[in-house]
């Protein structure tokens, strides 16, 4: 924080852990607001230090891979739609339905869709109850990174920044490596299958 800067006073939620017996839904997290307290917020121009992570900073042209990914999603029985209502999130997975924020670049749209498909494939089974949001977000973003890299998109530090946002680390990635590799391979095999040519007999 720069010396002498004045913040804006807001009401910030005070959260507590949910009862473990509470049924979890997509919008439920591990905590719930119980009260509010006064807190100050500052514009980024009033601060010093490291730059904030640049989420969704993916570049390139997914070209035909975007259509193929959409086809894979349809084949999985998953509904895909676009809505401004999910902003500021770029995408949302709700068990059989993926919603994307319109207006993203083609590369960002593809990366977000791969992320949400990873949620559908990895976290709509009994594993959901066995994993925390930190694990789920790390796994989904790692899958998206592998898939994006596999088709030649430039991901820069986008995946790393996203994973750090959810406090993911190398240890967690290693523990989830098998799930990440299997899911990314399934997606890449599906969207790249048309390019695999069979040599003549």
Image (cartoon, grey):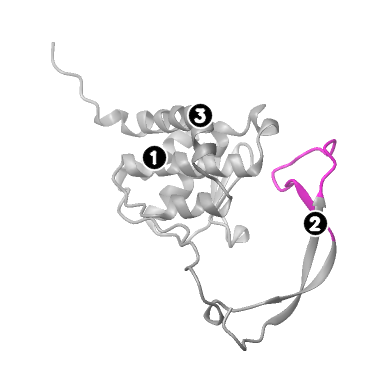
- Mark 3 is surrounded, within 10 Å at the Cα level, by few (under 14), some (14 to 19) or many (20 or more) other residues, namely some
Q: Quadrant of the N terminus?
A: bottom right
Residue 188 relative to residue 80: left or right: left
Q: CA distance from mark 3 to mark 2?
A: 31 Å
Q: Position of residue 65 (x, y in %)?
A: 34, 42
As for residue 6 lying within the magenta part, the answer is no
Residue labelled with disc 1: 146
- Mark 2 is surrounded, within 10 Å at the Cα level, by few (under 14), some (14 to 19) or many (20 or more) other residues, namely few
Residue 200 relative to residue 75: left or right: left
Q: Looking at the rendered structure, which numbered label has been put on residue 15?
A: 2
- Mark 1 is surrounded, within 10 Å at the Cα level, by few (under 14), some (14 to 19) or many (20 or more) other residues, namely many
186 and 198: which one is in front?
A: 186
Closer to the N terminus: mark 1 or mark 3?
1
Closer to the N terminus: mark 1 or mark 2?
2
Which residues are the magenta region?
Answer: 17-34
Which residue is at a point 58% across and 62% down the rendered structure image? 88
Q: Quadrant of the C terminus?
A: top left
186 and 50: which one is in front?
A: 50
- The answer to which image quadrant residue 19 occupies is top right
Q: Which residue of the protein is positioned furthest toward the front in this rendering?
A: 3
Q: Secondary structure at mark 3?
A: helix
Q: Secondary structure at mark 2?
A: strand
Which residue is at a point 53% across and 56% down the rendered structure image? 90
Q: Position of residue 60 (x, y in %)?
A: 30, 54
Residue labelled with disc 3: 179
- The answer to which image quadrant residue 143 occupies is top left
Q: Which residue of the protein is positioned furthest toward the top in this rendering?
A: 201
- Image height check: is 130 above or below 6? above
- The answer to which image quadrant residue 123 occupies is top right
Q: Secondary structure at mark 1?
A: helix
């Amino acid at each position: 924080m720069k010396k002498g800067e004045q913040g804006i006073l807001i009401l910030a939620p005070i959260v507590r852990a949910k009862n473990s017996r509470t049924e979890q839904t997509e919008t439920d997290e591990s905590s719930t607001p119980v009260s509010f307290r006064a807190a100050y917020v500052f514009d980024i121009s009033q601060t010093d230090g490291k730059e904030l992570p640049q989420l969704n900073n993916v570049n390139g042209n997914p070209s035909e891979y975007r259509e193929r990914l959409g086809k894979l999603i349809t084949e999985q029985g998953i509904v895909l739609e676009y809505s401004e209502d999910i902003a500021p999130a770029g995408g949302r997975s709700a068990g059989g339905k993926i919603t994307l924020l319109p207006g993203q670049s083609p590369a960002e749209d593809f990366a977000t869709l791969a992320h949400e498909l990873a949620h559908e494939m990895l976290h709509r089974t009994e594993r959901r109850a066995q994993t925390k949001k930190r694990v789920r977000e790390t796994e989904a973003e790692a899958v998206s990174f592998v898939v994006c890299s596999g088709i030649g998109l430039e991901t820069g530090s986008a995946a790393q920044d996203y994973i750090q946002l959810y406090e993911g680390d190398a240890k967690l990635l290693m523990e989830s490596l098998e799930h990440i590799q299997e899911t990314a391979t399934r997606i890449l095999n599906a969207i790249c299958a048309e390019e695999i040519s069979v040599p003549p007999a």
